[in-house]
Amino acid sequence: MEGLSATEVVEVMVAMFASGDPSEAATVVADDYLDHQGVGAGAIRGVDGFAHVVRTNHAAYEHQEISIEDLFGVADRAVARISWRGRRHDGEKVDRETIDIVRVAEGRAVEHWGARA
């Protein structure tokens, strides 16, 4: 997947969240990746950190649908508005949106910032 654009990298990353399978994360996430959003305990780092977030998110849901509603990129950055809909194992329904920014270098994500819309 060498040479992917920033928007293509985001599409692949979101597809991993949708499937729950981060096995190909190293193809689009850099070893020195830094997720500024974190998950409770602070920043997430590297391919393993990204894969952990994907697996943790997927495990929390009985059913989940993730879709990109808006996506655009300029140079080394892409911005996406993403919908997250689903049902957790305890029956709680989730319907939320996030705004995510990803910086890409050499076809792989190196930084991520995110917030609820």
Image: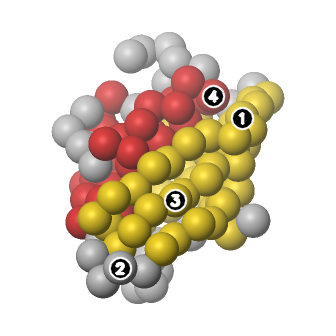
Looking at the image, do the residues carrying marks 3 and 4 touch, with CB atoms under 8 Å apart?
A: no
Foreground mark, 1 or 4?
1
Q: Nearer the viewer, mark 4 or mark 2?
A: 2
Residue 87 placement: quadrant: bottom left
Q: Is residue 105 above or below residue 38?
A: above
Q: Dot 3 corresponds to which residue?
A: 85
The answer to which of marks 1 and 4 sits earlier in the sequence is 4
Q: Nearer the viewer, mark 1 or mark 2?
A: 2
Measure how far apart labels 4 and 2 are at the Cα level: 33 Å
Which quarter shows the C terminus? bottom right
Q: Secondary structure at mark 3?
A: strand
**Which residue corresponds to the image point at 52% horizontal and 59% vertical from the top-left?**
85
Kind of residue at badge 3? Arg
Give whichever of 10, 109 is nearer the camera. 10
Say which residue label 1 marks: 71
Would residue 92 be visible to someone looking at this image? yes
Mark in the foreground, 3 or 4: 3
Q: Residue at point 52% right, 32% down?
A: 11
Callout 1 touching callout 4 (CB < 8 Å): yes
**How busy is the neighbourhood of tag 2: few (under 14 within 10 Å), some, or many (20 plus)?**
few
**Disc 2 from disc 3: Cα separation:** 13 Å
Circle number at residue 91: 2
Please give the residue where the numbered disc 4 appears in the rendered image.
7
Q: Dot 1: few (<14), some (14–19), or many (≥20) neighbours within 10 Å?
A: some
